[in-house]
Image: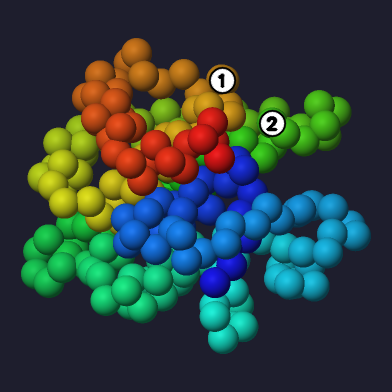
Amino acid sequence: MELFVTKNSPYARIVRVVTYELDIEDSITVSHAKTRKADSPYYTINPSGRVPYLVSDDGIGIEGTDTICEYLCAASKNSLWSYPNGDDGWTLRRLHSLAHSSLEGLSVWLRETHRPKNEQSSTIIEHERARAFRLLGEWERSITDPLMSGELNRAQITLFCALGIEKFLPEFEWRGAHPALHAYMNRQANRSSFFNTDETNF
């Protein structure tokens, strides 16, 4: 299989984390896609131009972080990306949605800052900055939920990769005011799947 990524995409990092957790990283070729280029050859592979994008062994292309993770987990007969039954299933859905909201907003903020200075929207940047810090306040409370400290799951992975955007976005200084979340990130940082997908090791 071949996985197309870009270096600073948290969405692509989520999939790469999952490949390490499933112990299948050596069976997947990771390729860097050239996106946002008018003549990029990547568009002949994935017409949308988005990452991550997985080409399976039978040549089928799969787009979308959750879909790719679900596919890989199903192929590996692993429940990492599944929801448990009962109340925990609904709690995990809620936490994953919350983590995904953080991921989406931070990604928009990051993309806007990478545009040429004269094309950046201060309105968008301020909107996403404010959203990010409101969500940090919610996470400072929610990080104590047992599902955020037990067996690794989709909410934990998504949150870690979302907050990891701080390395590309210097304005996103959140650790000092959120000690519980800071401690959580420090604990997770040494997990091999997170360590091996850090951009400094990529």
Which sits in the foreground, 178 or 71?
71
User: What colour scheme governs how the chains and residues are painted in the rendered image of this protein?
Assistant: rainbow
In the picture as drawn, the residue positioned furthest to the front comes out as 26
The residue that disc 2 covers is 113
The residue that disc 1 covers is 171
Residue found 36% across the figure and 46% down from its top: 193
Is residue 99 among what the camera can see?
Answer: no
Under tag 1, what secondary structure?
A: loop
Placement of 2 over or under 152, stated as above or below:
below
Q: Residue 171, image x and y in percent?
A: 56, 20
Mark 1 is surrounded, within 10 Å at the Cα level, by few (under 14), some (14 to 19) or many (20 or more) other residues, namely: few
Which sits in the foreground, 102 or 38?
38
The kind of residue on which mark 1 rests is Glu
66 horizontally vs 189: left or right: right
Q: Number of numbered discs present?
A: 2
Residue found 49% across the figure and 49% down from its top: 13
Placement of 17 over or under 200, stated as above or below:
below
Q: Residue 114, image x and y in percent?
A: 72, 34
Residue found 25% across the figure and 70% down from its top: 78
Under tag 2, what secondary structure?
A: helix
Placement of 201 over or under 3, stated as above or below:
above
The kind of residue on which mark 2 rests is Thr
Which sits in the foreground, 76 or 14?
76
Which quarter of the picture shows residue 192? top left
Which quarter of the picture shows residue 43? bottom right
